[in-house]
Image (cartoon, rainbow, N blue to C red):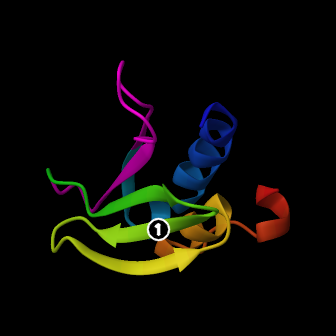
Amino acid sequence: MPNHRALLARWLEAGRCMGLCDASAFGPSPGEIDSDHVLVWVRENPDPAYLITPDGMNWLVTDWLRREPLAQLSTFEAALNFIRPVLKLTEAA
């Protein structure tokens, strides 16, 4: 996910005015496979609001508080914009 970190930072900065507070990207721990994920915090809540994970060739957005899947999208950019549409997808590419 290193190539997604710059996009995540731009999206977070652009979305601060829409309630985005923080986001963190995590890679696999030693011995784990496919555990890349992003947690997104909104409105200064101490618990993350969203989880973004790779799901085969897609990206899954999950409501972290309710542990319910919300959307399966074809790109990481689309997953971010599902949460807060603050970047044009052409900007994100």
What crowding class fits label 1: few (fewer than 14 Cα within 10 Å), some (14-19), or many (20 or more)?
Answer: many
Compared with 8, 43 (above or below) is below
Residue 45, how many percent across, how many down?
Answer: 17, 57
Amino acid of disc 1: Leu
Query: Which residue appears farthest toward the bottom when viewing the image?
Result: 70
Q: Is residue 92 left or right of residue 36?
A: right
Q: Nearer the viewer, residue 92 or 56?
A: 56
Q: Estimate the x, y position of residue 89 in percent, counting from the top left.
A: 77, 69
Residue 53 falls within the magenta-colored stretch: no
x and y, in percent, of residue 55 in the image? 50, 62
Residue 39 horizontal/vertical position (percent): 35, 50
For the C terminus, the quadrant is bottom right
Residue that carries the numbered disc 1 in the rendered image? 60
Report the span colored magenta.
Answer: 24-45
The quarter holding residue 58 reads bottom right
Quadrant containing the N terminus is top right
For the view shown, which residue lies furthest in the top direction? 30
Side of 69 relative to 89 (left or right): left
88 or 72, which lies in front? 72
